[in-house]
Image (cartoon, grey):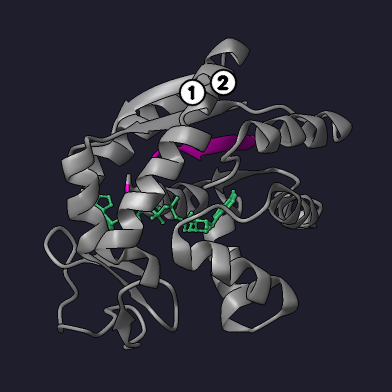
């Protein structure tokens, strides 16, 4: 069995939350460009230093940088049976690069899952998000609160609010999404792989909807 899917949707739609669980269930890596870039920033690598200025302002990191990162990641042996791409592609140029990358490897996408969530709900999810500094587990102050305020249930690490979840930056990220990423809905509709999921309900319901969708397309 293999599973190669893209999770597409606006900031805060719940892509990371669902990608972690689906990747775990299928035994394939979650390839999350946002997480990879945040790790590079935390390690102050040259790539991280370049990426930081784009991320802090809510803009996109240049295509060439992100395409290079994903190309290297997909070449690793654990990605041979598939992957859950979370936050990539985000521009038409990235989607075309992914098509080329997969074609070179004789692979195809099974599905692109589009997360449909209203703007007010996105704002609620983004402003309440907290993340563990140590293990990266995600929480939400209202929908998925930690047992002890400020502390990760999984590893006891400190929870923090992402810098780009500040109100002013969130607005910019949503605008960038509408301009650069939303056109991918039509792109993947044309390729015949787009699957819409109503992602506005509780996380468990969204996961069940994704499983139903994936069950129909996974090879
Ligand atoms: P990235 O980290 O990818 O951010 P994003 O796409 O904006 O997505 P988020 O992580 O904000 O949201 P999510 O959909 O994963 O939601 P989550 O599951 O956390 O990218 C960050 C930056 O990196 C970009 O702005 C850009 O600069 C750069 N970058 C990354 N990829 C790039 C690329 N390909 N090209 C160029 N630049 C790139 O959920 C959010 C909150 O809601 C959580 O608190 C969660 O607990 C809660 N929640 C989740 N599901 C539910 C639910 N069903 N009900 C209630 N609450 C829920």
| Magenta stretch contains residue 215 | no
Image position, residue 69 (x, y; %): 73, 57
Ligand 1 lies in quarter: bottom left
From the top left corner, tell me how far across and down residue 29 is, in percent. 61, 54
Is 8 covered by the magenta stretch? yes
Q: Residues within 10 Å of mark 2 (few under 14, many from 20)?
A: some
| Label 1 – label 2 distance at C-alpha | 5 Å
> Which mark is on residue 24?
none
- Left or right: residue 105 versus residue 131 is right
Query: Would you say residue 216 is visible in this rendering?
Result: no
Q: Which residue is mark 2?
A: 188
Residue 167, position as x, y percentages in the image: 25, 61
Q: Is residue 49 left or right of residue 58?
A: right
Look at the picture and state if 77 lies above or below 84.
Answer: below
Q: Which residue is mark 1?
A: 185
Quadrant of the image containing the C terminus: top right
Quarter assignment of residue 153: bottom left
Q: Are marks 1 and 2 in contact (CB under 8 Å)?
A: yes
Disc 2 residue lies near ligand 1 with CB under 8 A: no
Q: Tell me the SS state at disc 1.
A: helix
Q: Is residue 38 among what the camera can see?
A: yes
Residue appearing at x 47%, y 49% in the figure = 25
Q: Nearer the viewer, residue 191 or 137?
A: 191
Residue interval drawn in magenta? 1-12
Labels in figure, total: 2
Residue at point 47%, 68% (across, down) = 56
Image quadrant where one finds the N terminus: top right
Indicate the position of residue 2 as horizontal and vertical percent values. Answer: 65, 36
Q: Height in image: 144 above or below 60?
A: below
- Asked whether mark 1 lies closer than 8 Å to ligand 1, one says no
């Amino acid at each position: 069995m293999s599973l190669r899917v893209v999770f597409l949707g606006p900031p805060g739609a719940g892509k990371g939350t669902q990608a972690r669980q689906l990747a775990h269930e299928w035994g394939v890596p979650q390839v999350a460009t946002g997480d990879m870039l945040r790790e590079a920033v935390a390690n102050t690598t040259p790539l991280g230093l370049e990426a930081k200025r784009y991320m802090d302002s809510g803009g996109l990191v240049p295509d060439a940088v992100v395409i290079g990162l994903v190309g290297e990641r997909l070449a690793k042996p654990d990605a041979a049976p598939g992957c859950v791409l979370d936050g990539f592609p985000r521009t038409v140029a990235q989607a075309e690069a992914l098509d080329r990358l997969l074609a070179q490897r004789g692979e195809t996408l099974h599905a692109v899952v589009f997360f449909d969530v209203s703007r007010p709900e996105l704002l609620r999810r983004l402003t309440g998000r907290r993340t563990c500094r140590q293990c990266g587990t995600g929480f939400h102050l209202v929908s998925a609160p930690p047992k002890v305020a400020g502390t990760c249930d999984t590893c006891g690490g400190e929870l923090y609010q992402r810098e780009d979840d500040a109100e002013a930056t969130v607005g910019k990220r949503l605008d960038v999404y509408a301009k650069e990423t939303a056109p991918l809905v039509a792109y993947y509709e044309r390729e015949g792989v787009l699957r819409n999921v109503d992602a506005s309900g509780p996380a468990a319901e969204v996961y069940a909807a994704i499983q139903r969708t994936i069950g129909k397309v996974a090879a």
